[in-house]
Amino acid sequence: MDTFEIETKRRSYADSRFIDCGGFRVHYRMLGTGKPPFIVLLHGSFLSIRSWSKVMRPLSEESTVLAFDRPAFGLTSRPVPSKNNEARYSPEAQSDLIVNLMGMLGIDRAVLVGNSTGGTLALLTALRHPARVRGIVLAGAMIYSGYATSEVPAFMKPLMKAMTPLFSRLMKSLITKLFDKNIRGFWHVKERLSDETLAAFRGDLMIGDWSRGFWELFLETHHLRLDERLKTLSLPSLVVTGEHDLTVKTEESFRLARELPGAELLVIPDCAHLPQEEAPEAFARGVQAFVRRIG
């Protein structure tokens, strides 16, 4: 048993489950009635399934709730892509993984709830697989900045791939150094993030050869042009922003609510980029009310 497997076993929840999907060994949890409506929770970068721990149970009172660790994060495996391995880290591949995982777990259609880069993937999945999505909840979603608009120049990719060992080590050093400061920046009231929870998030990320998985994800980053594509979406949508979000500024969420056809807007006070962490009761109520409204 290698280091990753040992750490995965040690850090698993009592109800943790694992399934092979899209070339990954995906870590997931499911709570609730086992019947529709279904909710799928998509966490942001540098975080894990842990980010939903305060809202999963309340949401599961009226729904079946699925949360899983995205590729490169948490207890989901981090294979190196190859000719013999279908694992891919691109946004499109992650979108396909979401709907394939749903299908394997008996979920035909679901409300996708995405936070930060998870919101990017929720919107992308709704655009690419609209028949599988009942609605979307976008909380501090990166649509006009960050992950959705970043791009590794095509002419640099061959060189960067050739120098993967070096760049991977540099990225590991940088993330390790800045991790605590970066995560604390997601909170409005820093004292609400305990040292124990911060250490748990760090431990969820830094398992095995974790930097290699993140490097593969970074290499596949490209401009998704969601600002142009979102105007074609006709699914029910709820845009959520923390009143004090500085990671994805509230103005971006206001813009998203204006430009996404028929979108509702929910501003949650006294919190920042992770309303499900800082204001879990208000967040859960907002999502539950949205799910009820769309039937």
Image (cartoon, rainbow, N blue to C red):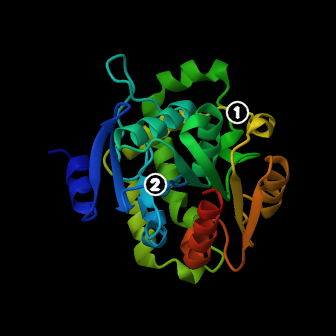
User: Residue 123 at what x, y percent from top left?
Assistant: 65, 43
Figure quadrant of residue 202? bottom left
Identify the residue at image location x=67%, y=53%.
Answer: 141
User: Residue 245 at what x, y percent from top left?
Assistant: 72, 67
286 to 96, vertically: above or below: below
Pick whichever, 6 or 29, lies toward us.
29
Q: Amino acid at mark 1?
A: His
Q: Are marks 2 and 1 in contact (CB under 8 Å)?
A: no
Q: Amino acid at mark 2?
A: Pro
Q: Image quadrant for the C terminus?
A: bottom right
Identify the residue at image location x=67%, y=33%.
Answer: 151
Q: Residues within 10 Å of mark 2 (few under 14, many from 20)?
A: some
Residue 186 in view in this figure = no
Residue that numbered label 1 is attached to: 223
Task: From the viewer's perspective, tell me whether residue 65 is left or right of residue 125.
Answer: left
Query: Regarding mark 1 in the picture, which secondary structure is present there?
Result: loop
User: Which circle marks residue 142 in the picture?
Assistant: none
Task: From the viewer's perspective, tell me whether residue 182 is left or right of residue 256.
Answer: left
Identify the residue at image location x=58%, y=67%.
Answer: 288
249 to 135, vertically: above or below: below
User: Which circle marks residue 36 in the picture?
Assistant: 2
Pick whichever, 272 or 133, lies toward us.
133
Q: Image quadrant for the N terminus?
A: top left
User: Residue 47 at what x, y percent from top left?
Assistant: 49, 58
